[in-house]
Image (spheres, rainbow, N blue to C red):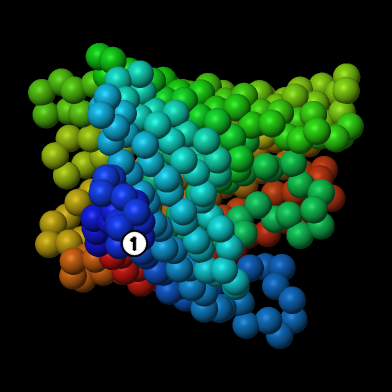
Amino acid sequence: MRKLLLGTTAIAAAATLSTNVALADVSISGAMEFTYSSQDSGNAATGASQDSFATDNDVAISFSNKTDSGLSIFMVSKIEQVSGITSDEAYMGIKGGFGTLTFGQDDGAGDQLTRTAHDLVGPDALNDGGGGVLGAQAGNGNLSDDNADLIDDVNDENAITYILPTMGGLTVGATYKDAGSGASDNADETVVAAKYAFESGAVKGSIHYGNNNISGATAGAASTNSDSMAIDVSTGPIRAVIAKAEDEVSSTVTTEVTDYGIQYNVGNGLTLAVVGTQVEENTGGETSDITTVSAKYNIASGLDAYVTYHDYDYKAGSSGETADDGSWTQITLKTTF
């Protein structure tokens, strides 16, 4: 990360229009991932190679300034380049003794405070687009996600988020997103999430909970809910996470996800992780069982290599999809600045 001190009134000062210069702390950071991906699917199209290259490039610029009263005022602009350049995050905020209040396109409280065992894996985890393991070729499936953080959440969308200051290990936050002003834009979202951190001797841990309520898209339509709970415990080189999430796909269909994993820091830059995931819906017998094995190696400061292998067994039940028993392997080189 490169930090610069810039005068917000530098142009005016240079023109001798002002002698009062407010200093802003400016941080510029970037990251890039280059990934080789190979899938061994039982449903591959004839002649398909099932392997590919992909890149993910992120650049973030953040500005912050402290007022005379001690408040921190900040702004963040993050752009992402995958197939094209897009705005990934763009928000402003105020931080002080009351907590942190953000406005704009940022991760909601649920994304910040809930947990999944795939957080142990790295950039090729299922919660980071780690593979097509849910079998939704026809678009008829009811499995809405493949990991157990808060499934329906406000993620880099225009919203207001408030995170209270941590009190006795407890952090609580809330996010509100307005879906729009049209007749079919009533699906407003309200997220409430919390994390409680604890420590006992050599053991450190945290308990996580999140809930998201989405109003019906049209007047009188039923609302839907998502919930997530997790515990994250570490001692020495070992870290373990168990998480469970539920998501109401409709008023009658629910996706349930349970994942559990363990990570071991071998030393000398090498970290290993194993995660098991079960995904199922409550009515039609549609399921996916996934086993993930991952290794991370720190090559040098700011340069990491990841190898991630997902083995999945998707059963279609009555969804109308096609069953698939396959695997997904990804090798990623990631650099950060």
Q: Estimate the x, y position of residue 83 in percent, counting from the top left.
A: 60, 73
124 or 152, nearer to the observer: 152
Q: Position of residue 149 (x, y in %)?
A: 50, 36
Residue 119 figure quarter:
top left
Q: Residue at (36%, 23%) from the top-left corner?
A: 99
Q: Residue at x 55, y 40 (%)?
A: 104
Q: Is residue 246 left or right of residue 219?
A: left
Which quadrant holds the N terminus? bottom left
| Badge 1 density bin: few <14, some 14–19, many ≥20, Cα 10 Å | few
Furthest residue toward top:
168
Confirm whether residue 324 shows in the render: yes
The residue at the point 70 percent across, 73 percent down is 44
Q: Quadrant of the C terminus?
A: bottom left
Location of mark 1 (residue): 15
Residue 63 percent coordinates (x, y): 36, 49
Does residue 272 appear anywhere in the picture? no
Q: Is residue 163 above or below residue 328?
A: above
Q: Residue furthest front?
A: 16
Where residue 48 sits, quadrant-wise, is bottom right
Asked whether, in this view, residue 5 is left or right of residue 152, the answer is left
Query: Which element is circle 1 on?
Result: loop
Q: In the picture provided, is 64 more to the left or to the right than 189?
A: left
